[in-house]
Image: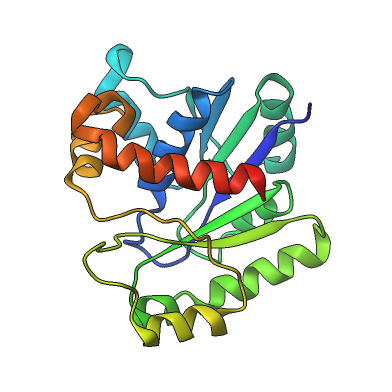
Amino acid sequence: MAALRIALANQKGGTGKTTLAVNLAAGLHRRGATVLLDADPQGSAGHWARVGSESGDLPPVRRLGEGAVDAAIRDAARAQRHVLVDCPPHLQSGVLQQVMQAVDVVLVPVQPSPLDLWASVDMAEAVRTAQRRNRPLRAYLVVNQLDRRNALSGAMQQALAEFGLPALANGLTRRAAFRSAALEGGSVYALGSRGAAAVADVEAIIKEVLSS
């Protein structure tokens, strides 16, 4: 069975892209061999994994440079069941378009406010450009930092509808467990009971993506 290749992308900072990438990678790793390719020049995913070192529960994290991106993703897919790519946080990088032309799914994390969503509008156009060359590419918004005490505002619902990309029914709730996992260099799965609710968030996203 061909590997599932997933890109995490948004040109706007502070959307939780790396948090989503690392925890999805950890969850998918429990289902089969997984690698996380870090194409972000800041190298946040790699730093996260190095904090945990040998004691961490994360799959391998490898740097993905600017050269031969498509070939690097194909090579990773030959030995893995899941390949995730934490993309650069800017549209001007040719790496982002190269990644989106080489993956099956792109997930675009967004904050639950219309202003944050509208700041990501160029990302939707970048996805549509990639889909003209990679027609099977599926793309979804993933709402991050949700407050479960409050439903999404009407303005946010309308902004999501106007964005032009479908949103997953599941997202990440604002939880201390995600910060704790980063500080400890592992995923929310490694936190035991402290991370149970956060794991449920991640699992819901994984199951929705795998069934889409």
Q: Position of residue 158 (x, y in %)?
A: 47, 86
Q: Give the residue drawn at x 31%, y 72%.
A: 151
Instruction: Name the residue at 21% across, 28% down.
Output: 193
Q: Position of residue 36 (x, y in %)?
A: 51, 33
The image shows residue 161, relative to residue 180, as above or below, that is below
Can you give x and y, in whole percent of width and height, for residue 199 in the image? Answer: 34, 37
Q: In which quarter of the image is the N terminus?
A: top right
Colour theme: rainbow
Q: Observer-nearest residue: 83 or 211?
A: 211
Q: Residue at x 36, y 53 (%)?
A: 172
Relative to 19, residue 72 above or below: above
Image-based side of 87 in relation to 79, left or right: left
Snapshot quadrant of residue 12: bottom left
Tell me if I can see residue 4 in this picture: yes
Question: Quarter of the image holding residue 35?
Answer: top right
User: Where 66 sits versus 113, above or below?
Assistant: above
